[in-house]
Each structure stands twice: as C-alpha cells, then as structure tokens.
Image (cartoon, rainbow, N blue to C red):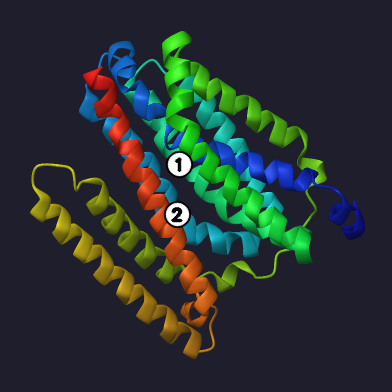
Amino acid sequence: MNETTNEQSWIPLIVVALASFIIALDATFMNVSISQLVVDLNTDVNTIQLIMSFYTLITAAFILLSAKLQDIIGKKKLFLIGALLYGIGTLIAAISSSTTILFIGWAVIEGLAGALMLPATVSIVSGTYSGEKRTIGLAVVGVMGALASAIGPLFGGIMTTFFSWRYGFACELIIVIIILVLQNKIPHFEPTESKSELDITGAIISFIGLVLLILGILSLSKDDINVSVIVIILGIAVLAAFAWFEIRRKRNGKIPLLDIELFKDRNLRVGTTIMILCYLIMGGDCLQFPSIFKVY
C-alpha cells in the first residue's frame, strides 16, 4: 500500500485506535472486579490491588525506552510485537488459576506490551496522515483512550455481574486478534536510528526515576504517607538528574533518549499539562469504584 492509499484509508487509524482503547481499558475495568478476584483466586484485596498497581507501574516505567526503540526497530514492527505480547498476556490472565499467573499475564506481559504499543500509536498516525487528517487521527486516538478509561468500570461491572472478569480479558484478546489480522493495512516505516545510538544509561536512569515516582504516587493511600512522599521526592530528584544527563548528552553531539529542549515549545508544555491533569482526574475517579462497590 503506497502513501496515497494510506492517506485515503482510515483503517490504519482504526487499528491503532483499538490498541489505545484496550490499553486504557485494561487499567480501569478490573477495579470493580476485586471482590470476585479474591474469591476466584483465593487471595486478598491487597494482593489484587498490588497486581493492578504493577500494571500501571510497568507500563509507565518503560514508556520512554519504548518511544526510542520505535526509531531503532521501526514503528510498525514494535507496535506488532507489543500487540502479540498483549494477546499472550490477556490469554494468560483470562485462564489464570492463581495470583502469580495473573501477575505474570496482566501486570508483567500486558504492562510491557502496553508500553511498546502506546508511543507507536501516535507515531503511526503522525507518519501515515498529514494536515487535517493527522489532526483528526490524533484526536481519535486520544478520545478512544479517554473513552476506555471512562467506561472501563462500567464494562468491568457488567462482565463481573453477568459473566466473569475472565470475559473482560477475552474481549481484549478478540480486539488484539482484529489488530493482528489488519496489520497489513498499517504502512511500513523504516528505522531512523541504529542500535549503537540507544541511550542505555539514560534509559536506566529514567526507569529508576519513573518507578520511584509512580510507586510513591500509587502508595499515597497507604497508612505511612511520609514514606510515599519521600519516595516521590526521590523519584523527582532522579528524573531531574535524568534531564541533566540528557542535556549534557545532546551537547556532546549524541542522540538523547529524550530531547529536553522539546519542552521549550509552549504548545507541548500546555498540552502535556492538560493530559496529566485529565489522567489524574480519571485515575482518581477510578480508584473510588472499589470502595463504592464494597459499600453496596
């Protein structure tokens, strides 16, 4: 399929929008299924909440590295690797008979797969379309993610009440199969960087910083809030060190994992801030659902 055909077809957009949908859905739909998970897997609430937290943690921690890997491996190839891993993870989660298997399938495999796919969804749309179509495409991807976050608890409630939480993962697996079937509709993108240009040190520093920051945020609802605040501060400090390292790396003529100078763009700063606020609001709302269902 040539570039002109890509521009005329919305199928590549549909494919990546479906990926954006299931990644966001996975982070919210199980919130209302905790009590059923506790019974089915013979465990406790804290263990299930820990697994849910690790899904978010793993996805966020690998997101920067994934964004750079798509330039080395190729946007489409990395996206499809992520989709295949996601399908394997959802299958394992759907048939899991213990919390260990659920953790491996959901938190580890799906979390990593989500990190591989997310940056590629935006890059594929940006590389496939131009002008007004690109704007529409990026808006659709964003709306699909937001929509999934909003309806996730409702979807999870329906699955748990009338069927089983396992069917929720089964529905995601069906969507993954659709994505893989339509993979030929996604245009091919040549890698733009080599493996030798990968900023491994920056990747390690950013990983540590993101893990500390997100771990601190996820543990804010625990009893010892002081420890959470300390972990958050440590995470911010490590991320500040990462920013300094990336600036020095670029000044030395090397390709950074993240070009900090991009944030000089006012539109990027404002857009990023708005997105963070939106996700914080949606995340806060979702965290209330488990307690609401306990009461009723």
- SS at badge 2: loop
- SS at badge 1: helix
Q: Which mark is residue 192?
A: none
Q: Residue furthest top?
A: 162
Left or right? Give the position of 223 relative to 236: left
Left or right? Give the position of 17 relative to 216: right
According to the picture, the residue beneath numbered tag 1 turns out to be 111
Instruction: Residue 141 in the image: state x and y as whole percent.
Output: 62, 49
Tell me if label 2 and label 1 are in contact, CB under 8 Å: yes
Identify which residue is drawn at 56% across, 30% down.
88
**Quarter occupied by residue 293:** top left
According to the picture, the residue beneath numbered tag 2 turns out to be 62
Disc 2 versus disc 1: distance between alpha carbons? 9 Å
Left or right? Give the position of 97 relative to 48: right
Looking at the rendered structure, the kind of residue marked 1 is Gly
Looking at the rendered structure, the kind of residue marked 2 is Phe
Instruction: Residue 49 in the image: state x and y as whole percent.
Output: 28, 32
Identify which residue is drawn at 16% across, 53% down.
228
- Determine crowd level at label 1: few under 14, some 14-19, many 20+ residues with C-alpha closer than 10 A: many
